[in-house]
Image (cartoon, grey):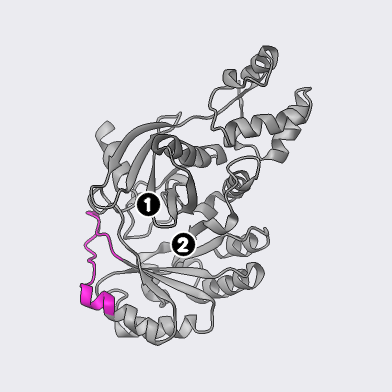
Amino acid sequence: MHKTELNSLTMEELEGYIYSIGEQKYRAEQLFTFIHKNQGTDIENISVFSMGLRDKLEKVSKINQLRIFKRFDSKIDNTKKYLFLLEDNNIIESVAMEYKHGLTACISTQVGCKMGCSFCASTKEGLIRSLTPGEMASQIYMMEKDLNNKISNIVLMGSGEPLDNYENTIKFLNIIHEPKGHNTSYRNITLSTCGLVPKIYKLAEEDIPITLSISLHSPFDEDRRKIMPIGNKYSVYDIIEACKYYNHKTKRRITIEYTLIEGVNDREKDLNELVKILKGMNCHINLIPLNPISESSQERPSKINIERFERSLVKANIPVTIRREMGGDINASCGQLRRRYTNERH
């Protein structure tokens, strides 16, 4: 029998569900608070419900749970990397990073990824399945419990393409933002996409003012297609136009993710074209020196070249930062840990 996953329902959906099983709607708020504020995982522990109601819920529904499979602690900067075991024995990866402004969680939205970017380890086995909203939220709650600390910022930048799991991602955003639950401000959430253009337009219409982060990595279509297969479907021009629309609708600044790869996208002509296409757009560039992976021969540029790239963008009045590498001693590249342990288990 298929059981309804309670932690994947928005407050509105939960009200409808509770009513459909013959209970008063106010029970939905109690249940939502139990799961998303108090981080409860067992229906039998909902003390505000009668034993009869708990039994009734347990027969037809469940709270999907994750288990910490392994945690890695950086000795450099207090970053914690987690491998979570899902109920179907798949493994996903999440990271908790300490910044001056608080704790940031980088979570996964899919098991694996089908986007095929050449420099990313998450995509090497393709997409296994998408995560449910409850599985996305549980990554945050499990890290908070484990660290005994509140997560204030969330980035959807782990394994998977969030906009390829669109409906579940939108539900997750709704759930995590709900004041009666975790109550995370939309402004403290960043969603990273490789550029699914129709979904960017759709997201702009949702009235969810999160920060949109675009994995651009090259201003030239021909070069981008070589490292990002999605470039065969949507051009750089299409992506930039979609970003401008998102900008206009949400009044939120766009982040441009740009992984610097030696000899591929760190040349003078890349720099000039990047300045040209981003001129006048409300954006910020995040330069990411490549984390080399074993499946690719691509290399990280020299420190001198990275800094030259940054200086030139500053000179062109484009806000830019070089991303600080977090947890460099515990396999920093997204997807590497999950792949290693998945391979070992087989």
Residue 263 lies in quadrant: bottom left
Disc 2 element:
loop
Q: Is residue 118 above or below residue 10?
A: below
Q: Is residue 346 left or right of residue 242?
A: left
Q: Which mark is residue 194?
A: 2
Q: Do labels 1 and 2 touch, CB within 8 Å?
A: no
Q: Quadrant of the N terminus?
A: top right
* Mark 1–mark 2 distance (CA, rounded to whole Å): 26 Å
Q: Is residue 298 above or below residue 89?
A: below
User: Overall secondary structure of the magenta stretch?
Assistant: loop
First along the sequence among labels 1 and 2: 1
Identify which amino acid the numbered label 2 is placed on.
Cys
Tally of marks: 2
Other-residue count near label 2 (Cα within 10 Å), few / some / many at <14 / 14–19 / ≥20: many
Q: Quadrant of the C terminus?
A: top left
Q: Is residue 37 above or below residue 320?
A: above
Residue in the image at 64% along x and 45% along y: 178
Where does the magenta region start and end?
A: 289-307
